[in-house]
Amino acid sequence: MRVDIVAVGKVKERHLAEAVEDYSVRLGRYCRLGMSIVQEEPFTESDSCARKDELKALEARKMLARIRPNSRVIACDLAGREMTSEQFAAFIENLGIASVSDLTFLIGGPQGFGPLALARADDRICFSKMTFPHQLMRVFLLEQIYRAFRIIRNEPYHY
């Protein structure tokens, strides 16, 4: 299975970048992992809602350009469905059973997703109703994908 992550913004914190790298290496045993970073559009707190919507739309268009046409797209979104790690593993396993070999996860920027990105998503998942920094979300997602593959293969995953 090919798993791509399309995310807005670079991981700036060194310890988070190291965690992203660690899980990326670990996942190499289970899938072909691709990471695509879309430049975050600068915004200020004083920007109008319309301006913020414009910036999210720009980010969304850049995200869409990074998705392969036949990829199954899953947005990490607060409005998505929550799952346990075991349910997430079953979700990924069922995609494989259904011959989905190309999977793309989307991680929005600090302002969230533009409507075009959410419209392209085939599914939405929510890791928590709490809001997390988008840089940290990358680590959470990679860890859960790694955990899912370990669960699918009946390998120990509690570290």
Image (cartoon, rainbow, N blue to C red):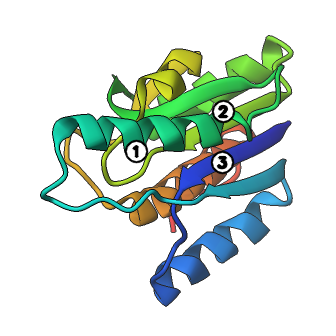
Q: Residue 76: image x %, image y %?
A: 45, 37
Q: Residue at x 57, y 28 (%)?
A: 74
Q: Is residue 30 left or right of residue 53?
A: right
Q: Which residue is mark 3?
A: 5
Q: Is residue 137 left or right of residue 17?
A: left
- Can the viewer see residue 84? no
Q: Nearer the viewer, mark 3 or mark 2?
A: 2
Confirm or deny contact between disc 3 and disc 2 (CB under 8 A): no
Q: Residue 32: image x %, image y %?
A: 87, 50
Q: Residue at x 63, y 42 (%)?
A: 62
Q: Which residue is mark 1?
A: 55
Q: Secondary structure at mark 3?
A: strand
Q: Residues within 10 Å of mark 2 (few under 14, many from 20)?
A: some
Which image quarter: residue 36? bottom right
When the figure is inspected, residue 139 is found, relative to residue 1, above or below; the finding is below
Q: Residue furthest top?
A: 98
Instruction: Please name the amino acid that badge 2 sits on.
Output: Leu
Residue 64's disc is 2
Dot 2 or dot 1: first in sequence order is 1
State the residue in front, 93 or 68: 68
Dot 1 or dot 3: first in sequence order is 3
Q: Secondary structure at mark 2?
A: helix
Q: Is residue 66 left or right of residue 32?
A: left
Q: Residue 28: image x %, image y %?
A: 84, 60
Instruction: Please name the amino acid that badge 3 sits on.
Output: Ile
Q: Residue furthest left?
A: 46
